[in-house]
Image (cartoon, rainbow, N blue to C red):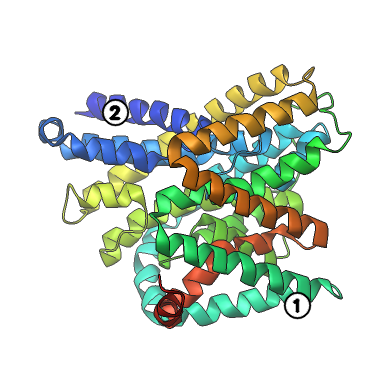
Amino acid sequence: MFLEILLFTFLGIGVGVVTGLIPGLHPNTVFVMILSLTFFLAQIPTPMVLAFVISLAISNTFTDFLPSILFGAPDPATALSVLPGHRFLLAGKGYEALFLTVIGGLGVAVLTLITMPLLLYLIPQIYNSIHTYLHMILLFIVLWMVLTERGMAKLYSLFIFILVGLFGFVSLNSLPSEMVLFPALTGLFAFSTLIISFHSKSTIPEQEETREIKGNHIKGILTGWLAGWLAGILPGIGAAQAGVIAAQVFRAKIRDFLTALGGINTANILFTFIVFYTLGKTRSGAMWTVSQLVDKLTFNDMLLISVVGAITCFISAILTLKIGKILIRRMKNVNYKRLNLSIIITLIVLVFIFTGWVGLFISLLGTCMGLLTILLGVRRSHLMGFLILPTILYFSGLGIFLGLFLGI
């Protein structure tokens, strides 16, 4: 049984790497395909399927930063890494940006596994205490984000947040989320960044391949771990929203921010398994897949998840850095304008393939809002109002009335 579990773990890591490298291809797509193979699943023991699901989900959290940092193609979990990642790339430190996300994922995984006995006790207590006040907590954070801007940027940021939030509310309530998230976030973050870069005189400089990147990563890891709590425990809060909250609450510097983002993604996956074990609630596609196979997780299942998770994290970290180093080497002599143009065209094609003409229209709207945010000179974290405002409206109960008013 041990060798079979190890085999399924390696298989999951491989598939997770592939889904991470291809923009728009989400692990949830693979999970849906797996569940459609009911006859095949019936022949496989549950521990093997569990090993495959957890290893795929975790390995994806490491490699999905590669497209966002090097090519500007985000998914919901990595959208906020596009801007700082590009800044590092243009400073010749693309590998360092990738290293920071990897060290964040590894650090948070170790911290989560060490504290798991405490988490199994605390998570139900915390969830029952604060989930009723989620909309108020988010509203407070949004106001803080706005008020920390300077001068007229306060009004501009509030305008952007409301505009993008309504865009998110209407689109997410009119269409399936899988048709909205990829094109919207690609427009808001990737296309807007790439268009500005295309019209600048930037070129990709020689990239450093430092073997040892010095610095204290503890703040970033702790920030990612605590924000991962939020993303894993509370409904409606994903890694991107938690990233916004972490950046504001902990005043994270750019290196700490990238480390935290890497940690949030990994923490989110691990915490969703803990939440299902303690509360019986699903908070991710991976956990939903497991819930279709078993009614509840046992203590032995949690031990298996811990071991497979640890193995996956270390292997995925090595693979991500190795693949990243190869890609960065190939970018040294690339014409940056031509690269930007090719990425824009590639993303347009991917958006069309996955979401059709509707997705292209959503991307166009998102791009206009992203460019407006850049021109107004406000922080692009306000663009995450696309997900945060609909969450506030949903948990406050106001979403129903707004939906009726708008006729959606």
Counting labels gives 2
The answer to which of 279 and 181 lies nearer the viewer is 181
The answer to whether residue 184 is above or below residue 91 is below
Pointer 2 residue: 8
Identify the element where label 1 is drawn: helix
Q: Quadrant of the N terminus?
A: top left
Identify the element where label 2 is drawn: helix
Describe residue 238's horizontal placement relative to residue 246 as left or right: left
The answer to which of 35 and 165 lies nearer the viewer is 165
Report x, y in % for residue 187. Answer: 62, 48
What is the quadrant of residue 157 in the picture? bottom right
Pointer 1 residue: 147
- The residue at the point 50 percent across, 46 percent down is 359
Describe residue 39's horizontal placement relative to residue 139 as left or right: left
Q: Residues within 10 Å of mark 2 (few under 14, many from 20)?
A: many
What is the quadrant of residue 138 in the picture? bottom right
- The residue at the point 68 percent across, 60 percent down is 381
Q: Residues within 10 Å of mark 1 (few under 14, many from 20)?
A: some
Describe residue 69's horizontal placement relative to residue 284 as left or right: right
Report x, y in % for residue 15. Answer: 39, 29
Report x, y in % for residue 387. Answer: 53, 63
Report x, y in % for residue 356. Answer: 45, 40
In front of the other: label 2 or label 1?
1
The three-letter code of the residue at mark 2 reads Phe
The answer to which of 194 and 222 lies nearer the viewer is 194
- The residue at the point 32 percent across, 44 percent down is 305
Residue 214 shows up from this direction: no
Residue 407 shows up from this direction: yes
Q: Cα distance, mark 2 to mark 1?
A: 49 Å
